[in-house]
Amino acid sequence: MKFLIVAQRFHTNLYYRTKALQDAGHSVRIVVLYKGKSEFYEGLKPMQVKLSMFSRFLTKLQAFFKKVELKSAFELRIQSPNKEFKKIISIYNPDVILLKAYQNALAIKTLRTAKKYKIKVLMLTQTPYAHIKGSEFLFRLNIKLFKFLKVHAYITPIKLNYEVFKNFGIENVFYLPFVYPQNKGKIKIPKNSVNIISIGKFQKRKDQLLLLKVFNRLRNEGNDIKLCLIGELADKNYFNALRNFISENTLSDYVCIKTNLSYPEIKNEYQNYDFFVLPAYNEPAAYSPVEALSNGLPVICSDENGTRCYIEESKNGYVFKAKNEGDLSEKIKLCISDKEKLLKMKENALISAKKNHNPGGFEQAIGKILLKRTKNAI
């Protein structure tokens, strides 16, 4: 079977899903609008198509008002490919398009083209909402438009998205967790310091500053812990604030910061730590918790992370209240206070990863979805 993956950028969470399809013998090609700094697509060759003239004009106009380098929500919504996009689809003639775009120009352009060539589209979504700007009416119109444009099914890696769509009456939605190959290394109980790792872009909503405050408090209480922050240098001002906090609280001997590592380097980092913390808020669907679990690390994340559904409380991790320093502190204490329990949680992390995040299971599930004739969709 021939698959075409269409996305604004090839996020790393697509890599092992793509490899799972290839390993099963399918042909897979990838089309993107831009490439990010932290992506990983070793062995794959995403084709980058240029934006349409109108999209380029709007992007340049909007650039005058930007304050940071990160792409704005407006930019992501208006980006549409030029005529080359339609030509690629007509020549490759895929059986299925995996569309990682939602409520934006790329989604509409892809769906219109797929409908013309009678290609099934599986739309990858990560939204926890059944409204647009607070309007259920607009959301209903949007879903009706997608139905008219022949979305075969919605696929989401987060349970909340699945539940929200189901409760809204959308029947052709399926929950498929992110996938990642399991680390076969041995799990060891920490002998001395408990080592914590946190991975995420250095920007405000990732909230590494909250983690540093908690870490400093726990160190002052006499806990023998160390911390490593790893991420892409996205916001220099925020990054400098983190560095200043470390310096002002004399934490340089206990906290390391590593920036702009390659993805293979990041993958190798997990095995050097005992558990993983993602302090981010407003996090649609973080992929790093899956990487951590698959490397035998318990995960602590906030209740605003979509993939918190992968965490079984007190078994393979904990969920804390976003932006709540006290709650995060209590959850970390639960991991560092009993090393025997921490070892058990490490084992549970691998068990849950094997059960829920095996790459081979993704390809099998996709096959079943494509064969299924959905009924009663909105």
Image: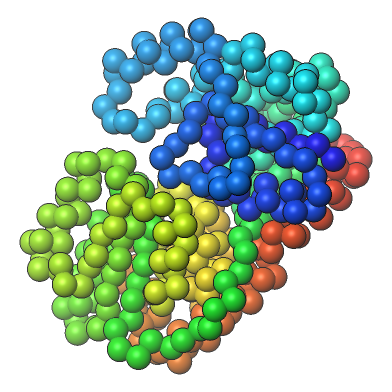
Determine the residue positioned at 45% across, 22% down: 75
Return the x and y of residue 258 as percentages of the image width and height: 29, 57
Is 191 left, or right, of 158 in this rendering?
A: left
116 or 329: nearer the eye?
Answer: 116
Is 56 left, or right, of 66 in this rendering?
A: right
Q: Establish if 336 lies above or below 367.
A: below
Q: Establish if 59 lies above or below 36.
A: above
Is 168 left, or right, of 297 in this rendering?
A: right
Observer able to see residue 134: no
236 or 78: nearer the eye?
Answer: 236
Determine the residue positioned at 64% across, 11% down: 83
Return the x and y of residue 228 as percentages of the image width and height: 30, 66
Count of marks, rendered view: 0
Considering the image in quadrants, where does the C terminus appear?
top right
Q: How is the image coloured?
A: rainbow
Determine the residue positioned at 16% across, 55% down: 243
Q: Establish if 82 lies above or below 188.
A: above
Return the x and y of residue 185 as percentages of the image width and height: 54, 78
Return the x and y of residue 218 as percentages of the image width and height: 23, 76
Quarter of the rendering containing residue 257: bottom left
Is 347 left, or right, of 252 in this rendering?
A: right
Considering the image in quadrants, where does the N terminus appear?
top right
Q: Establish if 63 lies above or below 329.
A: above
Quarter of the rendering containing residue 335: bottom left
Observer able to see residue 249: yes
Determine the residue positioned at 43% across, 8% down: 57
